[in-house]
Image (spheres, rainbow, N blue to C red):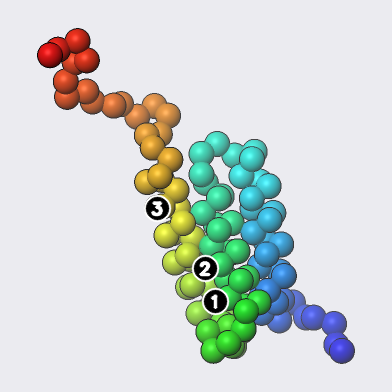
């Protein structure tokens, strides 16, 4: 078995999972959800490559498609995180009614 070249590393599922783990660890040091969306996107791409099948084969043969799918999964993960984690620090919440009324 030949050693993996730099050109073929993006086709290995464990490389994407290692990238996801590294980005997840770096997220602990960064404020907000800056790197967590990228970590989730890398984990999805790694899972698709690991499962194989027609989509995994397409990803393994096309670097451009792999990057596009990584970007799409990362964006969707970031949007979902932003929506589910509530108001960001420093953002103003507007009150429509006073709790003392009624």
Residue 15 image point, x, y percent: 71, 69
Specify whether residue 82 is in view.
Answer: yes
- Compare marks 3 and 2 and give the one earlier in the sequence: 2
Q: What element carries label 2?
A: helix
Left or right of residue 95, residue 2 in this image = right
The residue carrying pointer 1 sits among few (fewer than 14), some (14 to 19) or many (20 or more) residues within 10 Å by Cα, namely many
- Residue lying farthest to the top in this orientation: 100
Residue 88 sits in quarter: top left
Q: Say which residue appears at 43% left-offset and 59% top-offset.
A: 75
The answer for how far apart the CA atoms under marks 3 and 2 are is 14 Å
According to the picture, the residue beneath numbered tag 3 turns out to be 79
Category of crowding for the residue at label 2, using alpha-carbon neighbours closer than 10 angstroms: few (below 14), some (14–19), many (at least 20): many
x 51%, y 39%: residue: 32
- Which disc number belongs to residue 66? 1
- C-beta proximity under 8 Å, tags 1 and 3: no
| 97 lies left or right of 20 | left
Element type where label 3 sits in the image: helix
Residue that label 2 marks:
70
Q: Is mark 3 in CB contact (under 8 Å) with mark 2?
A: no
Mark yes or no: residue 7 visible.
no
Residue 94 in the figure: left or right of residue 56 = left
Q: Where residue 84 sits in the image (x, y, percent)? A: 40, 44
Q: Is the residue 14 above or below the residue 28 in the image?
A: below
Comparing labels 1 and 3, the label whose residue is closer to the camera: 3
Looking at the rendered image, the quarter that the C terminus falls into is top left
């Amino acid at each position: 078995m030949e050693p993996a070249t730099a050109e073929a590393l993006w086709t290995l599922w464990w490389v994407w999972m290692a990238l996801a783990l590294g980005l997840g660890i770096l997220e602990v040091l960064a404020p907000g959800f800056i790197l967590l969306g990228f970590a989730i996107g890398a984990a999805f791409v790694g899972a698709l490559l690991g499962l194989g099948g027609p989509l995994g084969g397409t990803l393994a043969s096309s670097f451009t498609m792999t990057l596009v799918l990584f970007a799409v999964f990362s964006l969707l993960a970031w949007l979902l995180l932003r929506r589910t984690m509530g108001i960001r620090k420093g953002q103003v919440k507007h009150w429509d009614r006073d709790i003392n009324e009624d």
